[in-house]
Amino acid sequence: VLLDLARMIFEEQSTIEHMVFRILTHTQSLIQCQRVQ
């Protein structure tokens, strides 16, 4: 049970990190688009 719980927490953390990474890259592309204009 503890192993499953740890695995769930680890998966949630990795998805959160993935979301943050996507948001960062999205914001970077937005800033670059604004610079071009």
Image (cartoon, rainbow, N blue to C red):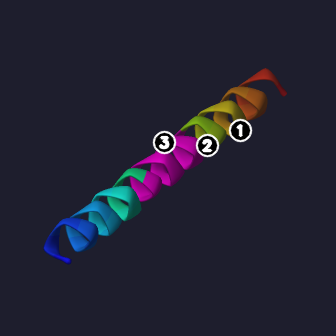
Range shown magenta = 15-24
Where is residue 25 shown, x and y percent of the image?
58, 35
Q: Mark 3 points at which residue?
A: 21
Residue 27: image tag? 2
Residue at the (68%, 32%) spot, across then down: 29
Q: Work out how far the residue at label 3 is from the one at label 1, CA to CA, in angstroms.
A: 14 Å
Q: Is the magenta stretch mostly helix, strand or loop?
A: helix
Q: Do the residues labelled 3 and 1 touch (CB within 8 Å)?
A: no
Residue 2 lies, with reference to residue 16, above or below; the image says below
Counting every numbered tag in the picture gives 3
Residue at the (25%, 73%) spot, across then down: 5
Viewport quadrant of the N terminus: bottom left
Residue at the (29%, 67%) spot, across then down: 9
Q: Do the residues labelled 3 and 2 touch (CB within 8 Å)?
A: no
Q: Are marks 1 and 2 in contact (CB under 8 Å)?
A: yes
Q: Work out how far the residue at label 1 is from the one at label 2, CA to CA, in angstroms.
A: 5 Å
Residue at the (79%, 22%) spot, across then down: 36
Identity of the amino acid at label 3? Answer: Phe
Identity of the amino acid at label 2? Answer: Thr
Residue 32 lies, with reference to residue 12, above or below; the image says above
Where is residue 31 shown, x and y percent of the image?
65, 35
In this view, which residue lies farthest toward the top? 36
Residue 20 lies, with reference to residue 1, above or below; the image says above
Residue 1 lies, with reference to residue 37, above or below; the image says below
Horizontally, residue 8 falls left or right of residue 27, namely left
Q: Name the residue under label 1.
A: 30
* Element class at badge 2: helix
Which callout, 3 or 2, points at the residue further toward the start of the chain? 3
In this view, which residue lies farthest toward the right? 37
For residue 3, which quarter of the picture?
Answer: bottom left
Where is residue 6 shown, x and y percent of the image?
21, 66
For residue 30, which quarter of the picture?
Answer: top right
